[in-house]
Amino acid sequence: MQHMTAPELAIWLADQTKTPPLLLDVREPWEYETCHIPGAVLMPMQSIPVRHQELDSDLSIVCICHHGARSMQVAQFLEQHDFTNVINLTGGVHAWAQQVDNAMPVY
């Protein structure tokens, strides 16, 4: 599994020459409603075992949670199920709010 910082992800998303990753937000709906990275798809961690087949294994997938622990578990699960380009967002949306988007609410 790869790891990526919030500023690294911001650079990737801003680069029009690169294919954007799937931003997979694995938090709970209330957390997602509080704040999320634009374009992120909500798929709560508990639903991953039954819904992971909905994901395109050919895409780069950046797993996102609050601080990075749940997303790391999901990334490991996806790798065990033949996803080859899985990235964990180090520090999660909290790091994104602190390092990229200061206007984003934190909780």
Image (cartoon, grey):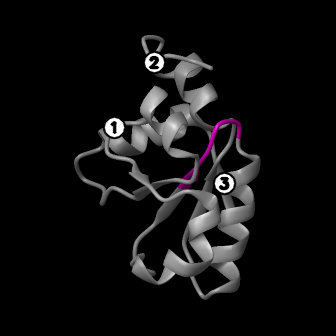
Q: Does the rendering let one see residue 1?
A: no
Most common secondary structure along the magenta stretch:
loop
Residue pointed to by mark 1: 38
Q: How many C-alpha atoms fall within 10 Å of the one at disc 2: few (<14), some, or many (≥20)?
A: some
| Mark 2 vs 1, N-terminal side | 1
Coordinates of residue 45 in the picture (x, y in percent) = 62, 60
Q: Is residue 50 left or right of residue 1?
A: left
64 part of magenta stretch = yes
Marks 1 and 3, Cα distance to the nearest angstrom? 17 Å
At x 40%, y 79%, the residue is 54
Coordinates of residue 98 in the picture (x, y in percent) = 59, 17
Image quadrant in which the N terminus is located: bottom right
- Relative to 99, say whether 85 is above or below: below
| Mark 1 vs 3, N-terminal side | 1
Under mark 3, the amino acid is: Ser
Marks 2 and 1, Cα distance to the nearest angstrom? 11 Å
- Relative to 69, say whether 54 is above or below: below
Coordinates of residue 55 in the picture (x, y in percent) = 42, 75
What is the magenta range?
63-67
Q: Is residue 16 left or right of residue 89?
A: left
Mark 1 and mark 3 in contact? Answer it, CB < 8 Å: no
Image quadrant in which the C terminus is located: top right
Mark 3 and mark 2 in contact? Answer it, CB < 8 Å: no
Q: Is residue 99 left or right of residue 24?
A: right
Q: How many C-alpha atoms fall within 10 Å of the one at disc 3: few (<14), some, or many (≥20)?
A: many
At x 62%, y 44%, the residue is 65
Residue pointed to by mark 2: 104
> Could you say whether the residue bearing mark 3 is in a helix, strand or loop?
helix
Q: How many C-alpha atoms fall within 10 Å of the one at disc 1: few (<14), some, or many (≥20)?
A: few
Residue 21 in which image quadrant? bottom left
**Viewer-proximal residue among 21 and 50:** 50
